[in-house]
Amino acid sequence: MHDATTYWWLATLAYLYDSLGGSSGGSSAIPVSVRFGGHKTTSNASVTPASYSDETFTPPKLSGSFVPLAHGRSKVNVTLSYSLLGLPLILFASAKLDVVK
């Protein structure tokens, strides 16, 4: 999931919409839901929208951490949900993860 930098453009659309008076006023990061092995887990993961500053473009980025619920190989699912103009939009990414003791 860490290589999917252009996958998270919904965060940028949400930021622009909010900044223009849409819904919540332009938050800088949107929290995501993380499921480990099919179960919701404790997480501080979020997606930061794209930015442009001092002639440097930074694409949207998924960052943060979560608490794995077990050891071994399991699937991690990350979901970003946002309602834009009344339309529910959902981005979903998954990857296999090996958790060692």
Image (tube, rainbow, N blue to C red):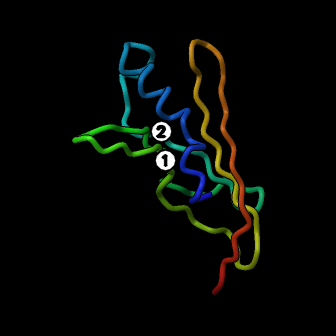
Q: Where is residue 22 in the image (x, y as percent from the top left)?
A: 44, 14
Give the alpha-carbon distance from disc 1 to disc 2, as whole Å.
5 Å
Say what amino acid the circle numbered 1 marks. Answer: Ser
Q: Residue at horizontal 58%, vertical 28%?
A: 82
- Measured as percent of width and height from the top left, residue 83 is found at 59, 22
Lateral position of residue 30 relative to residue 85, left or right: left
Q: Is residue 68 above or below residue 71?
A: above
Figure quadrant of the N terminus: bottom right
Pointer 2: residues within 10 angstroms few (<14), some, or many (20+)?
many
Q: Residue furthest front?
A: 55
Q: For the point 43% across and 38% down, which residue is it?
A: 49
Residue 101, position in %: x, y? 63, 87
Q: Mark 1 points at which residue?
A: 46
Is 3 above or below relative to 27? below
Q: Mark 2 points at which residue?
A: 30
Nearer the observer, 32 or 3: 3
